[in-house]
Structures are given as C-alpha cells and as structure tokens.
Amino acid sequence: MKAKEIQELIDFISQSGLAEVKIETDEFKLSVKKSVEPSALKTPEVSPAPAVPVAVASAPTPVVPSQETPAVSGTLVEIKSPMIGTFYRTPNPDSPSFVNVGDTIQAGHTVCIIEAMKLFNEIDSEVSGKIVKVLVENASPVEFDQPLFLVDTAG
C-alpha cells in the first residue's frame, strides 16, 4: 500500500465517522481505532509483516508498521518513525517511558507513541536488542523516516 493510498484511506475513515476499521492483506494488518480522549490513549493495534517493512508517509496516519533499517555499523539498527506526528515516550503523562537507554526489547515491543490528528499510534520494534540511544525528545514533532531510537541487536 502506497503512502498516498494510506492517506486517502485515513481521510475517508475520518470523514465517515467510523469508530474502528480493520484491514488485513498479505503484507500487513491494520487496525484503526479513534481515540476520543487523549489521556486515555487508546491506540491502534497493528502487526506488520515480519519481512516486509511498510513505508508510510503522511501526517495523519494511524498505520503503525514500524520501519527499521540497518544504520551506522554492524549490530546497530535505527527504529524510524513511520509517519509525521508528535513523539511520546509514555502512554500518558503519569506513566513511565515505554523504553529507556539500556532496556532490552523484543520484536513487537512498543517503544513509543506517535500522535497524528488526535490518533495515538503505538510504534512497535521489529528488532530485538538493547536500546543504546533515544534520538528524540519527548513531545517533539517527528518527520517520516526520522530515526527515533538506536538498538544494538547484538545486546
């Protein structure tokens, strides 16, 4: 699914008034659930295809397949933003961060939330390893494909 198609789908869903939509293809699964209250942070649940990262480019995207690509050297991998939005390290202001430097994560572990047009999208890691560095400040705007975390897959 191309970024333009995803954007058109999001626009359609936003205008339709639907509260929840689920789509499944050979490449990915998509579940979009509107959140009425930001403090509740009800987030969509998405399971990306294991070997096929999906590139997602546009702001109000509830699609959450995270995209990791090898970076810097050997065992370091960047977890990149699959969309434009606001980066949050915690599910709500009173909760601890999803991950911190030094934490060991498994593939599928939620590492952050990106909010776009009042939709809170959980970003899951597609790699297992140790968080080496958090590259974005909490509550900062992020761009598509912007590195968010550095993960050492050997650790």
Image: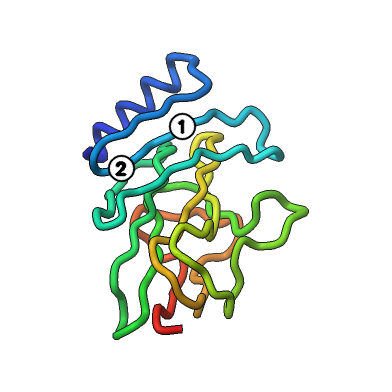
Decide: is 96 above or below 62. Answer: below
Local crowd size for mark 2, using a 10 Å CA cut-off: few (<14), some (14–19), many (≥20)? some
Disc 1/disc 2 C-alpha distance (Å): 13 Å
Amino acid type at circle 1 is Val
Image quadrant holding the N terminus, namely top left
x and y percentages locating residue 66 in the rendered image: 38, 54
> What residue appears at the point 44 percent right and 75 percent down from the top-left corner?
151
Q: Nearer the viewer, residue 82 or 51?
A: 51
Image quadrant assignment for residue 57 = top left
User: Residue 89 location in percent, x, y?
Assistant: 60, 59
Q: Disc 1 on helix, strand or loop?
A: strand
Q: Amino acid at mark 2?
A: Phe
Q: Circle 2 sits in a helix, a strand or a loop, which is it?
A: loop
Q: Residue at x 25, y 57 (%)?
A: 51
At horizontal 50% and vertical 35% (from top left) the residue drawn is: 117
> How packed is label 1: few (under 14 Cα within 10 Å), some, or many (20 or more)?
many
Left or right placement of residue 69 versus residue 128 in this view: left
Can you identify the residue that label 1 sits on?
A: 32
Q: Is residue 88 left or right of residue 24?
A: right
**How many numbered markers are drawn?**
2
**What x and y, as percent, mark residue 48?**
35, 48
Spot the residue most to the right: 94
Whole-percent x and y of residue 104? 54, 75
Foreground: 30 or 144?
30
Compared across the picture, whether 93 is left or right of 20 comes to right
Residue that label 2 marks: 28
Note whether 76 is above or below 2 in the view shown.
below
**Nearer to me, 3 or 105:** 105
